[in-house]
Amino acid sequence: MEQQISAVILCGGLSRRMQGADKGLQKLQGKPLFMHVKARLQRQVPQILINANRHQESYLKSGLPVFIDELDGFLGPLSGMLSGLKQSAAQWVLFVPCDTPFLPLDLAERLLQTVQQTQADLAYASDGEREHPTFALLNKKLIEPLQRYLLAGGRKVRDFMQQQRYAVADFSDQAQTFANINYLAQLAEINHCPETAKSPLTMLGISGYSGSGKTTLLEKLLPHLQQKGLRVAVIKHTHHDLHTDKPGKDSWRMTQAGASQVAVTCDQRWAMMTETARAVSLDYLARQLDPDLNDLVLVEGFKHEPLPKILLHRQAVGKPFPEIDEQVLAVATDYPCQDGVWQADIPRLDLNAVEQIADFIAAWLPAHE
C-alpha cells in the first residue's frame, strides 16, 4: 500500500446481547474472538491496536497496544474511533468490530483504494445488501468534527459518517465475511454442538473473478469426474436472494405460512428448504451433505475460506491476476502465462481442457481423503 494504515479492533462495548460478557474475549474454537480478528488483519496493516474499556490486562496478553475511550460512559463505536484516531501514528486508521472473525482479507486495501479514487475522508463497507459503517477507514483530519459530534450528544455511526466526505466500498463479492457473533448461543452452537463438527467430506474450491467461468467449468467437470468413479456434490454461494420453491406450490405455501423448515420428497429425490436469520458458514453447509453419497465437494464462491482451491483467470475478464495464497493448488487460465506470474511449484492448467483439470483433481483427491 502506498500509504501506511493502522488498525483498531473495537472491543469497548457493553455486549448487552451477550448478557454483559466481554465479547472480544469469548472463545471461538478455543481462541478469543478478537484474536481471530487480529489474525485476519496481520497481513493487511503494519500496526494493530485494541480499544477496550474492560479487562485491559487480558487484551494486553496479545502483545498489542490497548487503550480505553477518551470519553467516559460507554458512548459506542464512535467514541472508540475518536480515541483510535488520536492513538494512531498513521494518517489513516482502519476500524473493525471484535465480533467478526471472518472479515475480508483485503479490507484495508479496498477501503484505501475507495478513498483514493473518491477523494473522501472516510470509507466504509457494504456487502451489497447491508452497509457496515463499523468497518471503516478514517483520516485523522476527522478528529475535530467527530469530537464535536460526540460532545453534542451524537452517537449514530452512519449519521456522523454521512455528514462528512464519505464513500462506500462494495464488498458484495464476499458478503459472508461480515457475519458477526452476537450471542453466547451462537458460540455454543459452533463450539460445543456435535453437529457443528467439521465435515468429513473433502472440499475443493473453484475460485476466480465473476465472469471467469466457474459455473461453466463445474458443469463440464461433473460428468468427467463421474466417469472416474467419483461422487461429487456442489456448494455454490450466490449474492442474490435465493428461491428454490415455486410460488403457489404446497411447500412454498408452508414457508409463507411461517414454517422454519419444509421437507418435500418424491420417489426420485428429496429437498429441504430452511429459513435462516443469518448467513450460514461453509462448514455448516458441508455438514448437511451425506458422506455416504459423496466423495468430494466442489465449492463455488467462498473464495476467502481456508480450503484448497483451483484459481481461474480468463483473459477477457480484463482484471489483474488474482492474489495467490497458500491454499491455491493450481491455476487454470485460457492463455499461456509468462514465468514469474506465480510460484513455479504451482501448476498451470488449461481452463478449456476439462479432462486435464478432472485428471488433476482425481490425482489430488486420494492423498486428501
Image (cartoon, rainbow, N blue to C red):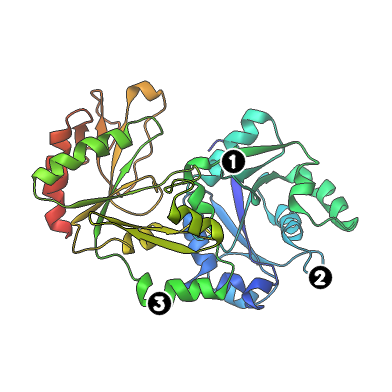
Pick whichever, 108 or 161, lies toward us. 161
Amino acid tagged 3: Cys
Of 236 and 331, nearer the camera is 236
* Image position, residue 275 (x, y; %): 49, 59
Task: Find residue 111 and name its label.
Answer: 1
Q: CA distance from mark 1 to mark 3?
A: 37 Å
Tell me which label, 3 or 2, sits earlier in the chain: 2
Label whose residue precedes the other's in the sequence (1 or 2): 2
From this view, report whether residue 310 is shown above or below residue 88. above
Whole-percent x, y for residue 282 in the image: 38, 57
Q: Secondary structure at mark 3?
A: loop
Look at mark 2 in the image and give the residue it sits on.
Answer: 73
- Which mark is drawn over residue 193? 3
Residue type, numbered disc 1 = Leu
The image position of residue 166, as x and y in percent, is 72, 38
Q: Can you tell which quarter of the image residue 290 is in? A: bottom left
Relative horizontal placement of residue 141, taking residue 194 as reference (left or right): right
Measured as percent of width and height from the top left, residue 116 is found at 63, 32
Residue in view at x 67 percent, y 50 percent: 89
